[in-house]
Image (spheres, rainbow, N blue to C red):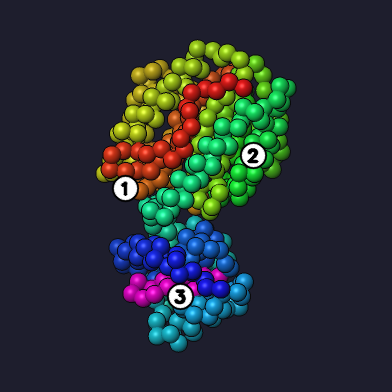
Amino acid sequence: MQLIPDFFKKEIEIRISSLRNHLIEGGIDAILVNANVNIYYLSGRFYRGYVYLPVDGQPIWFVVKPEVFDKEGNVFYIRKPELIPEILISQGVGLPKSLALEFDDLSYSDIIRLQKIFPEAEYHNGSRIMKMTRMIKTPWEIEQMKIDGLHHAKVYSKIKNCYKPGMSDLQLQIEIERELRLEGALGVSRVAGNLMEINMGSVISGENADTPSPYEFTMGGAGVDSSLPVGADNSPILPHTTVMIDMNGAFNGYQTDMTRVWALDEIPALAMKAHDCSLRILHELEKFALPGVPVADLYVKAMEIVEEEGLKEFFMGHKSQVGFIGHGVGIELNELPVVNARSKDILAENMTIALEPKFVIPEVGAVGSENTYQVTRSGLVNLTVFPEEIHNL
């Protein structure tokens, strides 16, 4: 078996070229990649091991397991990373004077171990470099996300039929998860960071939307166990309340993020006004978010609309509010850029971002929509096309 199939080699070359450019910009000789998501990004598959990319040479694939790949194309089997320098020297690559390691992704002990292997090197944070590389998607990656979006929307079209009177939010989530798996979802939501854990998404009903969570998600929720305090808490879905459904679309190694709202019976005018405000923010940002626009300006513009509508008290939470309205999406659910007022990033063509201007209305629940978008020269293109109005259960 080839580690990288022939049909995929040009795609990997594009990604390697982009990564190499970031290394050149940073004046770094090489990067050693070990994190799961980054190995997948650079090879199109996951294996246990490492990818070594020198700035002026071809990548070298160090495989610990499984031992199923052809030993060609710079593929080397190793039992431990201490064998890497010897192989580099034998291949005429030489040892780096400056080396990037994934400081944000690896354990402290793993970082110390790798640093001991290259004791003469100056070290840089490779996690940031990989995130910056992955922030701009290739045409192939965008195509995968478009496919995800189609599957995602197809499942959302079945949600009304998933609901049965008397259900709790957890029971509804289980039925949606079933539809996602039947549609082909992998059942895994890859998220970055120690403060980000989730199953296949969130279904948050009524007052539970106002329950703060320790995680860095837009919406909180108590969850059903203290080991995962986020999302559905098994409370009944009550009349005149909303159900915010933010289930993950992950069908092919990439993800799309989409939120829609359902309601049981009529809901108060304040909730309807807040939902309309969310849609106004999305539709204005779809035209405003052009390549070259500072990411922070999206947040500023959204806040201007919220304050104009007099809804700041309920925006991005109520008891506990978060200071962002979106994030990058790709292999992980929360990639760069983060759409907040502090962002230094600039929008670029073929970024993929999720925008989620949401509100929490006390005693009613959460409202607002979220879409995953591709940044294009003419604005944002929605990859998660599904009606955005509040739907009836």
Label 3 vs 2, first from the N-terminus? 3
Kind of residue at badge 1: Glu
**Contact, mark 1 vs mark 2 (Cβ under 8 Å):** no
Q: Select label 1 or label 2 by which is in front.
A: 2
Residue drawn at 38 percent across, 43 percent down: 374
Q: Select label 3 or label 2 by which is in front.
A: 2
- Image spot of residue 55 (x, y percent): 35, 71
Magenta span main SS: strand
Residue drawn at 67 percent across, 19 percent down: 238
What residue is pinned by disc 3?
Answer: 60
Kind of residue at badge 2: Glu
What residue is pinned by disc 2?
Answer: 179
Segment colored magenta: 49-61
Kind of residue at badge 3: Ile
Q: Residues within 10 Å of mark 2 (few under 14, many from 20)?
A: some
Q: Residues within 10 Å of mark 3 (few under 14, many from 20)?
A: many
What residue is pinned by disc 1?
Answer: 349
Label 1 vs 2, first from the N-terminus? 2
Label 3 vs 1, first from the N-terminus? 3
Residue drawn at 56 percent across, 49 percent down: 251
Vertical arrangement, residue 80 with respect to residue 92, above or below:
above
How far, Cα to Cα, is label 3 from label 2?
41 Å
